[in-house]
Amino acid sequence: MKLRYFIPTLMAVVAAVFTGCSDDNDPTYLDEVRVSSSYVSLDVNGGSNTITVKANSSWEFDKIFAQTVTDADGKKETVYSELPAWLKASTLSGGAGETQVTFTADATLDGRTAELRINCGGKTQIINVIQGLATVSNATCAEVIAGPDSKTYRVTGTCTSIANTTYGNWYLTDETGQIYIYGTLDKSGKEKNFLSLGIEVGDVVTVEGPKTTYGSTVELVNVTVVNIQKSLIKVDSLSVKDATLPVEGGDITAFLTCKGNGVSVEIPESAKEWLSMVSVKSGDVPTVTFRAAPNAGGDRSTTVVFKTTDGKKEYTSETTITQLGAIVECPVADFLAAEVGETQYRITGIITSVANSSYGNVYVKDYSGEMYVYGIGSKGDFEAAGLKAGDIVTLVGKRGEYKGTAQMTGAVCEKSISVTEVSLAEFLTKEDSKDVYYKVTGTIDEIANDTYGNLYLKDGDTRLYVYGCYPGWGATGDARKGLIGELGLAVGDKLTVIGPKSTYKDVPQVNGGFYFSHEKAQ
């Protein structure tokens, strides 16, 4: 095996030990900042070691270590810190003069290293921390999955899917399992240059990097590519744009490059009831044609695998075929009860609260329940649309789940009704219209009908009749009944309702209002 793109670990460690600082004039020390030792050794069983930093001005450690974190909205992102996760320091910055810095690490079964960088006056001082003897383990995916975090592994497998072509996030699969590669360094060890490596789905790739676990996903982070063995088969193109077939079904052809002996095709069992293979043609450009049956359900997709061999080894490539489906229109309760999948759902309700306005992470409620929406459109779309809490929205998206909690993902806002918040007195001045909605708040002054929630609200000297306080948007028939008793609403409680204005026998009213929120009287 040719070890392309790889600097042997032992040579890297030796180089680290004998590199103390970075300066054009003197490779040994700097005038701006010096350390009592540029080499810090820690016991493999855990322990501490202290050095002295002497500087002529303020200094700090550079943030160069990438770590994966999750923000308050559940979005995964990369942040940078001064130290690797396994290492602690008594301080990360200091001023002019001498400062003692104590490094501490817990016990480890395997050796590990870190190159730290101190910045002072625009100059960089390097400190090499080594705990134990750093080793790299050759492993299968299963062994990586079962092994400890922070340990560095070398593993060989097939690239089965590429999630991000900037950072190089992709899936590596062998006969024992699958791991996620979160970040791939280029030939020079730099990030955000994955495309320069030329890795494609189907290639057999050997990588080396430290393991981490995010939730239930096992990852190797910022891996170094050791070797790439190009696949003898790949999918060059598909006859249908975006590999997406219409609801009524139809044919789609895959155009292949194959340098092996013959082509075989695998359609997953779960997709065989709607996707079949029509023909396989050899020649300079082999083709495989599939046929999808009409789709009466929601969106569906499957991954088709193409295989060839050189007589010794099997090579694979794959492509995903998607078929649009009918959109299921339903109340929130039915959406929450549905299974996670590709089916598209149409839900209409009120935005009850906004968790993140940039991404459009919101809570939406109708008469049957409330759901979390993990993003409406792309970043900025929610704000650009001027949406806010209280507005009525119709969303189309998929049933997803995060840590056991249902949520709508990939949501698109089909339409919205802007709801204007006004006082009771302002409401009385508005024109009647069944298409314009207002949000009003007042103290319950009288309950005329506790079944449908006919009641009077009062604010100062203004009194307003609410003809129906229903559980939420979309309620009909018996679903409109009983909210007053269910919530225990009573005279003196503060109530917020949403609805249009109408007039009955010269009396202005909220016509068919629905509940937004309430506060019990003290």
Image (tube, rainbow, N blue to C red):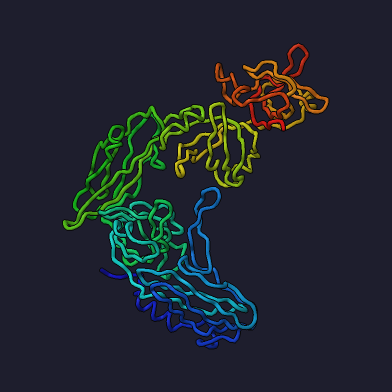
Relative side of 216 to 33, left or right: left
Q: Residue furthest top?
A: 505
Q: How many marks?
A: 0
Q: Residue furthest right?
A: 461
Residue 335 at x, y = what percent?
47, 31
334 to 270, vertically: above or below: above
Residue ID at (55%, 41%): 376
Residue 298 shows in this picture: yes
Residue 84 at x, y = what percent?
47, 67
**Which of the image's four quarters has the N terminus?**
bottom left
Residue ID at (36%, 31%): 249
Residue 257 shows in this picture: no
Relative side of 246 to 448, left or right: left
- The quadrant where residue 207 appears: bottom left
Residue ID at (57%, 29%): 366
Q: Residue furthest front?
A: 522
Residue ID at (41%, 74%): 131
Residue 390 at x, y = what percent?
65, 34
Relative side of 211 to 510, left or right: left
- The quadrant where residue 451 appears: top right
Relative side of 235 to 29, left or right: left
